[in-house]
Image (spheres, coloured by chain):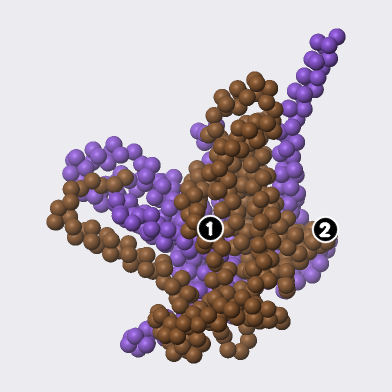
Amino acid sequence: MSTTAPISRASMWPRIVLYAVLIVFAALFLMPLYVMLTTSFKTLAEIQQGNMLALPEQWTLTPWLEAWGSACIGLDCDGISGYFFNSIKIVIPAVVISALFGAFNGYVLTKWRFRGHKIVFGLILFGCFIPFQIILLPMARVLGVLHIANTTTGLVLVHIVYGIGFTTLFFRNYYETFPNELIRAAMLDGAGFFTIFFRILLPASGPIIVVTVIWQFTNVWNDFLFGVSFTSGENAPVTVALNNLVNSSTGVKAYNVNMAAAMFAAVPTLVVYVLAGKYFVRGLMSGSVKG
Amino acid sequence: MSHSSSKREMSARARWQAWLPKLVLAPSLALVLFFVYGFILWTSYISFSASDMLPNYTWVGTHQWSRLWGSWTWGIALHNIWVFSLLYIVSCTLLGLLLAILLDQRIRAEGLLRTIYLYPMALSFIVTGTAWQWFLNPGLGLEKTMHELGWTSFSFDWLINADMAIYTVVIAAVWQATGFVMAMFLAGLRGIDGEMIKAAQIDGAPVWKIYLRIIIPQLRPVFLSAVVVLAHLAIKSFDLIVAMTGGGPGNATTVPATFMYSYAFSRNEMGIAAASAVFMLAVIAALIVPYLYSELRGPRS
């Protein structure tokens, strides 16, 4: 809803105030990112002088290189790069597989309904809202039994299992609005379960695939709880490495290196968000508001 | 002869087609039953057992629960999560609503502003915590900057002040989630029926009155969703606290999630950790189950 007032000189002032307020908020939201970025390009000497709002007097790339390749995390001084690749190794299979599960589940739960389909959906859905503390202890044991404790494979399994709820929710809500007539017509033509899915639904699933992939990518990339609980040392994902770098470094704190490392951890999700933010918002809406 | 065999073939195919969907759904259901519900049962049992460093299935009744409730740290954790959740939910909802209303006035650069308000949501809490820890650092951050800029009496040491540290976490958390709430309200505003608003405008009602009397009441479902989502995020909050304060200074910013983690993995008190996790689950279930029930039962078939 928008108010439709004719623009006159008297109504100019409220508009100016409105824009001023919006811009102040935008500045507040951008401030931490700005400070992170400028700090990461400053020398330590310049940081110690104060004024974190100022642009670097002497731009330097050293903190970025150090964060990537030579900062000490725990006992290893190889920077954050290895952990960054751990996260990539985790995020790709976890996203693809959980999205596949979600697509098939959503398809069955909307187009091949059976008695009790709502209960099954409810059971799956509740899984995405549990506080994960409730599964940490048994999961640690099960990963041990499966011999995938402290591996990225173990984390992939964890992320698939606890990602199914959201991916199922997204695909179910999307397929719910897909016309049943098309499905029925295809069935009369003799098309089976998989033919209908791959020929009719999947080609029309572009938007929801984008939403699901963005959602899962963000969640898995940003995960910290599972990473810190089930991995350690060189198998940790980037978020855990970042926290170790920032919060357990001894001696002089290299704030510029910390900020550069934080930027490395932030860039993948920021890029995804800026490139596909429209779908991200739409996905959040269809997922959370409409249940 | 051939007719009946093709009939038999048909019915075999039909049976297969009838089972196939269930077969496709079965692995997911099995995973969820084991990894969600099985694990909930296991952890619940552990909370009544003598487990410490390793699981010990000896039943000890409510022993671990009374130890949990007798714990001074747990009391702090509960107090903190209550303060944190309340401030977080109220601030995000009000700020989110305000931004949505302001953005809904035919703003020129709406897309750009929306992107700016929302981007923190894409960041990891660890990144947010790292950034804000630096930003609010009393030695070199905001305080020093204000001094440099000439405001020498400016003082902001909340991050290392045991009484105030929890509020710094609130600030960072609100910064991160407000854009998300704004997006929810914006979607709600765009879905409102314009008829009543037009009628009120024709009657000459002032804009603020139209918002207060007509528009905001219509956003009730969005308020409900926002509060449920935020409360659920608040109770689960762990990463941000670890990254910003590490639960400190001392244990001033301990919350149930950090309490559970430290009892499970560093203090080797599995029984107490399990009890605290079950408590967290119970609170979230009390919040989420009625919400999910009403959403699923709703008019959409």
On residue A272, the disc is 1
Q: Position of residue B136 (x, y in %)?
A: 46, 78
Vertical arrangement, residue A68 with respect to residue A254, above or below:
above
Residue extending furthest toward the left: A9
Give the alpha-carbon distance from disc 1 to disc 2, as whole Å.
33 Å
Q: Nearer the viewer, mark 1 or mark 2?
A: 1
Can the viewer see residue B290 in this picture?
no
Q: Which chain hosts label 1?
A: A
Task: Return the chain for callout 2.
Answer: A
Chain coloured purple in this rendering: B
Q: Which chain is brown?
A: A
Picture quadrant of residue A32? bottom left
Residue toward you, A7 or B43: A7
Location of mark 2 (residue): A146
Rendered residue at 71%/57% (across/down): A156
Q: Is residue B231 above or below residue B24?
A: below
Which quarter of the rendered picture does the N terminus of chain A lie within? top left
Say which amino acid is labelled 1.
Val
- Kindly tell me whether residue A6 is visible in this rendering: yes
**Relative vertical location of residue A27 with respect to residue A247 in this rendering, above or below:** above
Q: In this rendering, do the residues under marks 1 and 2 share a single chain?
A: yes
